[in-house]
Image (spheres, grey):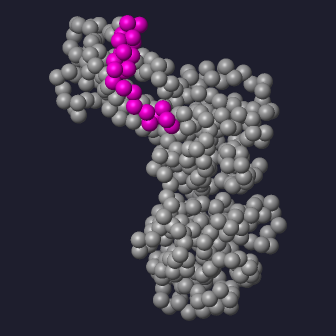
Amino acid sequence: MKVAVVGYPNVGKSSLVNRLTQSREAVVHELPGVTRDRKELKTEWNGRPLTLIDTGGVDLEDATELAGQVRDHARAALADADAVVLVVDARAGMRPGDHDLADLLRRQPLPVMVAANKIDTASDLPLAAEFHALGLGEPVPISATQGLGTGDLLDRMTALAPDIDVAGEDADDAVRLAVIGRPNVGKSSLVNRFLGAERVIVSPDAGTTRDAIDLPMTFEGRELILIDTAGLRRQAKVGESLEYYTALRSRRAAERADVALVVCDAIDGITSQDLRIAELAMKSGCATALVLNKWDVAEDVDLDHERARAAARLRLRPRVLTASAKTGRHVERLLVEATALAERARARIPTPQLNRFLSDAIAARQPPAGAGRRGSGRLKLLFMTQTGERPPRFSIQVNSRGRVTRDYAYYLENRLRERYGLEGVPLIIDFVERSERRERGTRGAAA
């Protein structure tokens, strides 16, 4: 069952969603208008799953373009919902915006309940009575900050639409694809192009996206979950608390994704901040590719130079792709590359293949001799197998871990990437002495 949470700006919608889902996924701030896109969060009440759709504050009298886009997204949330919660500020009392929204909701073919928020103590309970005048039934007095009345509200939600099928869940094998990058490089435009719809708000103003938004889609029969994120600025420029928390959510999005597309502005080329963002994604265990967006107006950029720059800075050697969210050029290819990256990060390589690879690598470059704590003698690589995936993890039996040099470990890692198309995929190689138990092996090379 999907429930849209709507209301005038700054009435506490996102605080309520966080309370009901027992999370901090929705951005909360004392400034009005923080939430702009619609964001879906899952929860459960008395054994029944619920999906709450957090929306931006709706002011029907605000004539600005951004306010109009927020209203459009709120209407889209209503079209996708099975029920609606209208959140009002009980302390502020009835406002014209509450009446306007109530009039809009009465014309919707959906069950509606009124949540009178900011009832923080029992003495505040009479404040909810004023909202009977909205004509939407008995208001539920609640406190998003204190938790007062939220159980009653959840009871009301699950009772409103008991016949709706709610069994569907995201497939476990869905590819989670995070779209990350600096502000205003076209991340949301790219996500909308992927989806074929204006699903997230796009504005020429940097910082329009503030939440990390999960958006399911299907591509060539494969389930994907796109994660549109807020722009990541240099740490020195993240001065206010609101921007700090939106950046934190972007980083968490990378941590829970299988693949990250780091979107860059092709006009600027790959900047130092783009490379830092790619490193952040890789350290999160995320397979990563860089995307030069706006390629329709930057075709004179030296692509070979940009690829060499990325390869020199980033050990995982991610692919550098080009696309234009505006024209749609190469956009489908990005999804092809992303799903292929996810498959490679999840794949298992048979042990016989790995040992043939090991023999070929040794033949091309002999292991070091006389290195390490054990004195003279050559490093011997005896056996290789894969021990894990997502990210791929490999174990190589050696005669002495002390003879493994950093340079040779990097050599094996790079040859492994070249052999099995693991560019941009984090991987781990453990070097295990033949006499040791496997679980005591230590990481020899990691990315």
- Residue 167 left/right relative to 117: left
Q: Position of residue 135 (x, y in %)?
A: 68, 89
> In which quadrant will I find the C terminus?
top left
Q: Residue at x 79, y 69 (%)?
A: 62
- Residue 326 left/right relative to 381: right
Q: Position of residue 146 (x, y in %)?
A: 47, 76
Q: Residue furthest left?
A: 435
Q: Nearer the viewer, residue 257 or 96?
A: 257
- Residue 269 left/right relative to 290: right
- Magenta stretch holds residue 357: yes
> In which quadrant will I find the N terminus?
bottom right
Magenta-tinted stretch: 342-365
Say which quarter of the image contains residue 306: top right
Say which quarter of the image contains residue 381: top left
Q: Position of residue 187 (x, y in %)?
A: 67, 44
Q: Residue at x 29, y 7 (%)?
A: 369
Q: Can residue 402 be seen in the rendering of this structure?
A: no
97 over 363 or under it: above or below: below
Q: Position of residue 421 (x, y in %)?
A: 50, 24
Q: Can residue 438 be seen in the rendering of this structure?
A: yes
Magenta: main secondary structure: helix
Q: Residue at x 75, y 39 (%)?
A: 328
Q: Residue at x 57, y 61 (%)?
A: 40
Say which quarter of the image contains residue 275: top right
414 over 231 or under it: above or below: above
